[in-house]
Amino acid sequence: MRPAELDGAPAGPAALSALALTNYGHFTTMVVADGAVRGLDLHLERLVRDCRVLFDAPLDVARVRALVRRAAPGEGRCVVRVTVFDPHLHLGNLGEDARPRVLVTTRPVPVSPPGPLRVRPAVHLRDLPEVKGVGLFGALRLRRLARRAGYEDVLFTDGDGAVLEGGTWNIGVVRGERVLWPAGPALAGTARELLRRTGAGTAARVTLSDLASCDAVFATNAATGVRPVTLVGDLAFPAGHPVVTGLAETYRALPAEPL
């Protein structure tokens, strides 16, 4: 894997310190396979939209693509994260005009696919849930608590028990032959949106109490695809439901777009 690069050059400690200490920016994470990305248009649209929201500034999509091509190998697979931030912004000058820069980091794709998820519900609404922001304190704290309680991750709900999203993934449920995507404030994940483009599922309000009448639960994420959820709190669900298996196959078969 290549070292972290900022605008195509090695990222120095000053810039990385600014990102760590100010922690203001946004990102997207994608799997690059043989120089192509599934849902590339959605990743780029997200970066442009979030850059406008957080920095009131444009983002050069062609340049982002070139930077990802530079970092990712031409053959094989890796996970690439594109983070957009301004190293010159800090707590004392956040109101100044921003000059966003692009940090590209890579990591290996897991050797084996992840297993089913067991999740612990928790009341939590992310700041600007429609933005994939770098400030993950709330989500990571709740994930840590879930893991220490014997689960793999956390499932966010609102104060009325409506299901929203996972810490870094979207959630879907199966009721009969129907796929439902819980409606509410949540990130429009690229994997979920790609499946919706195929006609899979409709949005509907789903509460924790509604899950008792559901046949299966699953998570979607660009890096892991479709993953069964086998436990929500104390409610158990099958790992091999045919609808979830079919969604996973559909997602894997989706074409990728060259960088």
Image: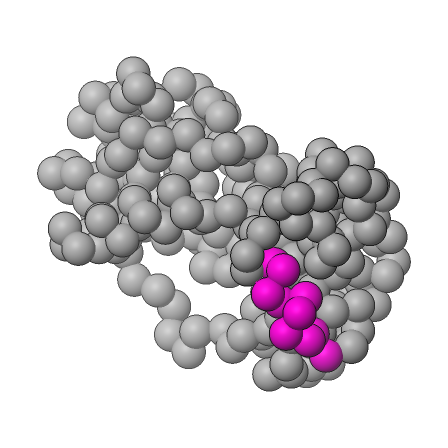
Identify which residue is drawn at 87% across, 52% down. Answer: 60
Percent position of residue 218, x then y: 35, 44
Report whether 67 appears left or right of 135. right
Front position in the image: 58 or 254:
58
Report whether 160 appears left or right of 34. left
Q: Quadrant of residue 35?
A: bottom right
Identify which residue is drawn at 58% across, 52% down. Answer: 22
**Number of numbered labels in the structure image:** 0
Front position in the image: 131 or 211:
131
Identify which residue is drawn at 38% across, 68% down. Answer: 113
Residue 128 colored magenta? Answer: no
Q: Is residue 220 above or below residue 109?
A: above
Report whether 174 appears left or right of 67. left
Front position in the image: 43 or 160:
160
Residue 257 visible in the current orientation:
no
Magenta stretch: helix, strand or loop mostly: helix
Name the colouring of the figure. Answer: one colour
Percent position of residue 236, x then y: 15, 41
Which part of the image, by quadrant, shows the C terminus?
A: bottom right
Instruction: Determine the residue located farthest toward the front in the rendered image.
Output: 92
Which part of the image, by quadrant, shows the N terminus?
A: bottom right
Percent position of residue 243, x then y: 37, 42
Range of magenta residues: 10-19
Residue 15 visible in the current orientation:
yes
Percent position of residue 70, x then y: 78, 76
Residue 12 colored magenta? Answer: yes
Identify which residue is drawn at 79% across, 68% down. Answer: 7
Q: Is residue 114 above or below residue 154?
A: below
Q: Quadrant of residue 78?
A: bottom right
